[in-house]
Amino acid sequence: MHLNTAPHLESPDDFYEALIDAHRELSTQASEALNARLVLLLANHIGSQRVLLEALDAAREAAR
């Protein structure tokens, strides 16, 4: 299995809105904790170390 970077979300705008809503009225610390929990939940769902490392590399490269 490899990292799928092609558009794949059923409703990306709705998900983005839900993500923003989840952060609404949270402190910076609480928002960062929510992000960390979300990343770990999704990583657990994916399960593949190889895919997760590819995702880390892709995200890090995009941040440069």
Image: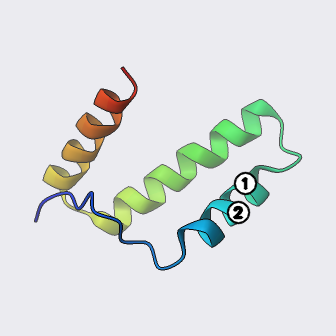
Q: Residues within 10 Å of mark 1 (few under 14, many from 20)?
A: few
Q: Residue at 59% x, 46% y: name it.
A: 35
Name the residue carrying label 2: 17
Give percent across and percent down for residue 16: 63, 60
* Depicted 55 relative to depicted 4: above or below: above
Residue 48 - label? none
Q: 30 or 1, which lies in front?
A: 1
Q: Residue furthest top?
A: 64
Q: Residues within 10 Å of mark 2 (few under 14, many from 20)?
A: few
Name the residue carrying label 1: 20
Q: 54 or 14, which lies in front?
A: 14
> Which quadrant of the rendered structure holds the N terminus?
bottom left
Q: Residue at 70% x, 63% y: name it.
A: 17
Q: Give the SS element for disc 1.
A: helix
Q: Disc 1 residue type?
A: Ile
> Which quadrant of the rendered structure holds the C terminus?
top left
Q: Give the SS element for disc 2.
A: helix
Residues tagged 1 and 2 counted as in contact (Cβ below 8 A): yes
Alpha carbons under labels 1 and 2: distance apart = 5 Å
